[in-house]
Amino acid sequence: MVDSNRCTGCEVCESVCSMAHYDVFNPEYSRIHRVRIDPILNTSLACLRCKDAPCVDACPTEALSQNPETGTIEIVDEKCNACGSCVRACPFGVITIHPDERKAISCDLCVSTQENSPQCIRYCPKSAIYLKEIDPNKDEDRFTTLSRKIKDGFPESKEGLLNNMREKYREYT
């Protein structure tokens, strides 16, 4: 989830995602995507782990599956032919095709990285990104679920790692 009142559209989440997964700062390699609707809204989107994920159903090669414990979409690169069916099926537009590897990519909460935890959350300078579990058994569509979670409110802002680093730097200068 992203608190759009805190998100400035700085693109740090995209940069750290691409660095964690591919050792390069490049938003095209990111599994989280900044959305800017000028002048009123900045936010980021990543996989919402839909119940009965349409991306999984749309894959003709069965390269995608949904982890029953985490809800994360898992992609078997050897089966993926970059046809884009999953991209078209995703109602949030958060699955993309890696521009060089020509394979589908989706947020995996950084479990495939050395850090093994969401780096977008760790490095967001405004603490705008956080994890909030969405009950997959609740009988409502994902738009209703997302609206309900937004109405529930966002956690108190804590200083992000970059803010903490700035304070430490100021202490030494």
Image (cartoon, helix red, strand yellow):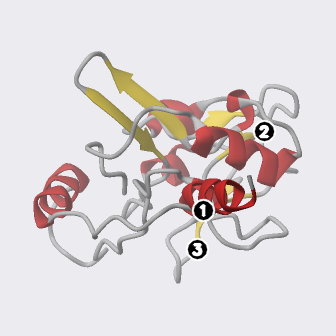
**Observer-nearest residue: 163 or 62?**
163
- Would you identify the image quadrant in which residue 99 lies? top right
The answer to which of marks 1 and 2 sits earlier in the sequence is 2
Question: Does 146 sit above or below residue 137?
Answer: above
Q: What element carries label 1?
A: helix
User: Which amino acid type is marked by label 1?
Assistant: Leu
Residue for badge 2: 103
Q: In this view, does 135 lie to the left or right of 138?
A: right
Q: What residue type is labelled 3?
A: Asn
Q: Which residue is drawn at 78% across and 66% down?
A: 112
Label 1, label 3: how far apart the Cα atoms are: 29 Å
Whether residue 79 can be seen here:
no
Q: In this view, does 30 lie to the left or right of 156?
A: right
Of marks 1 and 3, the one in the foreground: 1
The residue sitting at 79% across, 35% down in the picture is 25
Res 138 seen here:
yes
Q: Are marks 2 and 3 in contact (CB under 8 Å)?
A: no
Circle 2 sits in a helix, a strand or a loop, which is it? loop
Q: Is residue 168 above or below residue 7?
A: below
> Mark 1 — residue?
161
Q: Which residue is drawn at 67% across and 62% down?
A: 171
> Could you say which quadrant of the image residue 113 lies in?
bottom right
Question: Marks 1 and 2: CB-CB under 8 Å?
Answer: no
Precedes in sequence: disc 2 or disc 3 = 3
Query: Which residue appears farthest toward the bottom when viewing the image?
Result: 69
Residue at the farthest top position: 38
Q: Nearer the viewer, residue 101 or 84?
A: 101
Asked if disc 1 and disc 3 are in contact, CB closer than 8 Å, the reply is no
- Measured in 3D between alpha carbons, the distance from the residue under mark 1 to the one under mark 2, in whole angstroms, is 31 Å
Q: Distance between the residues labelled 2 and 3?
A: 19 Å
Q: Name the residue under label 3.
A: 67
